[in-house]
Image (spheres, rainbow, N blue to C red):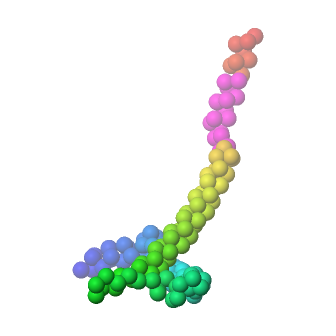
Amino acid sequence: MKKFLEEFKAFILRGNIVELAIGVIIGSAFSGLVTSLLDNIISPIIGCFNTGGFKGIHIQIWKANLYIGEFLNDVVNFVIMAFVVFLMLKGVTALMNIAKKEKEAAPPEPSKEEVLLTEIRDLLKEQNKK
């Protein structure tokens, strides 16, 4: 049982799990922010044209109400979230490309052996020309 708990502790404390947990927490907070934006800013603007914004849109078929507005609300919410994630991914990719170019721009210095072998090669070339 002790070994099992040690393995579980090692699993939980790995970097990827902690980063994932932080991402989920920030994502849920961001979801609330986007929902607030939609409910308090975008829906009232649409409400100028339709009473109640998206939430007022529904279709009644026999005794069933289909709340199309609620669905549209969720679609707009998803599009906003997807767009922000896309922008974040573009930013991270750009930063990674900058870091990669900096690594490629500065070639590593040759080792002592490489410098010595280069000098020997150059001396041999000079001797063969004479």
Image quadrant where residue 6 sits: bottom left
Location of the C terminus by quadrant is top right
Residue 58 visible, this angle: yes
Span of residues in magenta: 108-122
Which sits in the foreground, 44 or 129?
44
**Farthest residue toward the right?**
130
Residue 36 visible, this angle: no
Question: Is 77 included in the stretch rendered in magenta?
Answer: no
Decide if residue 63 is on the left or right side of residue 105: left
Decide if residue 62 is on the left or right side of residue 88: left
**Farthest residue toward the front?**
62
Question: Is 117 included in the stretch rendered in magenta?
Answer: yes
Which sits in the foreground, 115 or 21?
21
**Farthest residue toward the left?**
1
Which sits in the foreground, 39 or 92?
39
The percent coordinates of residue 108 (x first, y second) are 65, 45
Residue at image location 70% in from the left, 13% down from the top: 128
Image quadrant where residue 86 sits: bottom right
Residue at image location 46% in from the left, 70% down from the top: 15
Residue at image location 46% in from the left, 77% down from the top: 72
From the image, give the main secondary structure of the stretch colored magenta.
Answer: helix
The percent coordinates of residue 116 (x first, y second) are 67, 32
Location of the N terminus by quadrant is bottom left
Residue at image location 74% in from the left, 17% down from the top: 126
